Amino acid sequence: MVDIDLDLVNWSRAQFALTAMYHWIFVPLTLGLSFLLAMFESIYVRTGDEKWKALTKFWMTLFGINFAIGVATGIILEFQFGTNWSNYSWMVGDIFGAPLAIEGIFAFFLEATFFAVMFFGWNRVSKRFHLFSTWMVAVGSNLSALWILVANAWMQNPVGMAFNPETARFEMENFWAVLFSPIAMSKFTHATSSGFLLASLFVITISSWYLLKGRHIEMAKRSIVVASVFGLLSSLYVGFTGDEAAFESAQKQPMKLAAFEGLYKGEQGAGLVAAGIINSAKKPGDDQSPFLFEVKLPGLLSLLANRESGSFVPGIDDLLYGNSEQKVMGVVDKMKLGQLAVADLAAFKQARQDKNDQAAGEALAGFTANKEFLGYGYLHTPEEAVPPVSTVFYSFHIMVILGMFFPVLFLAYLIYTLNGRIAAARWLLPVGVSSYFLGLVAQQMGWIVAEVGRQPWAIQGLLPVKIATTNLAVGHVQATFFMFLGLFTLLLIAEIKIMVKQIAIGPEGI
Amino acid sequence: MPQSLTNIYTFYRDGFKAMTVGRILWRIIFIKLVVMFAVLKLFFFPNFLNTNFQTDIQRADYVLDQMNRPVVLN
């Protein structure tokens, strides 16, 4: 048996984060732009105006570039599961197998049929069938994302399964509980609607650039009208689903909520931090203030977490050391039960090897009694259960601030376009040009909140990342990290060059 | 070959032939897939458990051992 090297764990995490973040540059744009294409084309089919067709074909080309550069980058994550995260991969194979297989089959048939009709079918199939195919690409792409988000949600809230100590696998007991878990639903709606928002910003960015340059003005204005309406509705929905996601975090992952609010001592009627600077010297359990500066909105965090403004929201200290008055069980106590579960798991394995059925039965009973705390048995200190507070806090607040800015931007674009003054709004257009990049920042921050915020867990409360990794040489993981960095950089440069060239060419005829 | 299959074949063939930007994109996709599957997967990302163990019982045994290994704090 070989000890775990935490350097290896961190490099494995860094490699996975790099790949996932790179992958997520492309995915949300595909999810959202596919719907915008369907809307543009619907207007074309309804009006018969060829300019809408040219406009649709232009955005479709950019959609194709984004899709082609992004396609298959997600497969690299699966490579990493098998190599860097083999323990985890083995344990969850039964849970993830079905959703990921469905996604693969779904994506293949979707891409082989409707994508082909969408790109190759202009003037070769009927207008209505072409439009149907474009809508199917939009619906199918988004449904395809459902499965991977369900898998991710299961890691945040492992429901519908049971751990089998003989096979060391989590086994599916209730597929519907996995599919319809509240976290899966809020994750799917939040991720897809944020993709709609990002795609709307993408259209606004490029259209604004055309307006600033005085080129393709009519196409830009038409695109902006549709994108600003879609973006406005999407951004409002993102706010609603984000609120739901935060509520679910409060219920299922209270440590994550406490971290992204920098809340150490639980409060009744807890305030929401609107802005603040984290005190980096603050440690759990000490009496220092968590903030050097903060602006709080009274009662709002309680409302967000429990739907009651006067309710109690546990802080990091409550969650670590317990709060009997509020009936919060601390990590300290969970660790003791987790250690019993780990010991019983080892005893069960030994008893099975010794063919001692009685001892195996006793160990299994002990394990079953404490299995929900299994992951805590691997922690050395309670403080290990706290994610990096400042990373999560700043990511969350940057995301929220940007999330509040976007609806205002869409509304401004809509008003100025409907008034016919958008081309002259020289103060607004540069903001619009930068908006897609701000959208990308918000997207990445959202995933940092979701994934860094759930550390140290690979599976919430059951499996810490340090047990999920494969015992490899750290040099191997470092080498492949830099290989990916090089590969992704090259691909990104290729995308930017091709995209910029197409944007410079612009649409034909308008 | 039935007419419908011929039509599908012609549809895809003409679609690929008429591509402009698509040609560059397909080249990129092809290179990317070769790098990913023929280089990365083959030489750097073997499936650890499938490579090192013959049966599921051995794999389960190994993972259970891993669940009881100590952690080095750096």
Image (spheres, coloured by chain):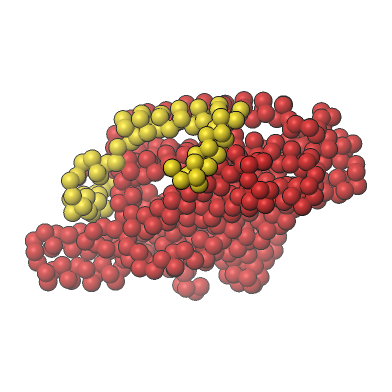
Chain colours: A red, B yellow
Q: Residue at x 50, y 27 (%)?
A: B27
A267 relative position to A79: left or right: right
Q: Position of residue B53 (x, y in %)?
A: 19, 44
Against A456, residue A174 (above or below) is: below
Q: Residue at x 79, y 40 (%)?
A: A51
Residue in front for this viewpoint, A476 or A486: A486
A176 relative position to A398: left or right: left
Where residue A178 sits, quadrant-wise, is bottom left
Q: Residue at x 47, y 55 (%)?
A: A147
Q: Position of residue B11 (x, y in %)?
A: 55, 39
Residue in front for this viewpoint, A248 or A484: A484
A154 relative position to A393: left or right: left
Screen quadrant of the N terminus of chain A? top left
Screen quadrant of the C terminus of chain A? top right
Residue A490: in sight, yes or no? yes
Against A112, residue A188 (above or below) is: below
A213 relative position to A119: left or right: right
